[in-house]
């Protein structure tokens, strides 16, 4: 019984620390995805605006 209590106490803080690490990892992943999306919209926004401008000019 004493070994069981020792193992339960030893593993308990690790679960909490791994859970906190998972939250941080997910937050970093969401931040990275946001940066990539903002970069893509910025880059493709300029390209798309130029394409629509040329299309509008050719239709007139």
Image: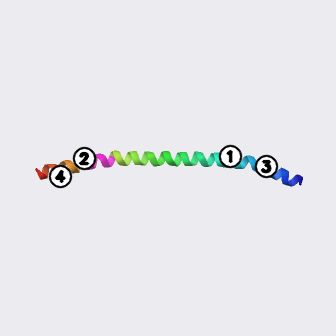
- Crowding at label 3, few (<14), some or many (≥20) Cα neighbours within 10 Å? few
Q: Is residue 45 shown in magenta?
A: yes
Real-space CA distance between mark 2 and mark 4, rounded to the nearest whole angstrom: 10 Å
Horizontal side of 60 relative to 2 (left or right) equals left
Pick whichever of labels 1 and 3 is earlier in the sequence: 3
How packed is label 2: few (under 14 Cα within 10 Å), some, or many (20 or more)? few
* Mark carried by residue 10: 3
Residue drawn at x 38%, y 46% is 39
Q: CA distance from mark 1 to mark 3?
A: 12 Å
**Residue at disc 4, secondary structure:** helix
The residue where tag 1 is placed is 17
**Residue 2 at x, y percent in the picture:** 89, 52
On residue 55, which mark appears? Answer: 4
Q: Which residue is mark 2?
A: 49
Query: Residue sitting at 61 percent across and 49 percent down?
Result: 22
Front residue of this view, candidates 38 and 5? 5
Q: Determine the CA span between mark 4 and mark 3.
A: 67 Å
Whether residue 39 sits left or right of residue 13 in the image: it is left
Residues at marks 3 and 2, CA–CA distance in whole angstroms: 59 Å
């Amino acid at each position: 019984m004493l070994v069981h209590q020792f193992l339960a106490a030893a593993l308990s803080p690790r679960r909490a620390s791994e859970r906190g690490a998972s939250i941080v990892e997910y937050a970093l992943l969401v931040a990275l995805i946001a940066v990539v999306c903002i970069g893509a919209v910025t880059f493709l926004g300029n390209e798309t605006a130029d394409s629509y401008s040329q299309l509008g000019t050719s239709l007139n």
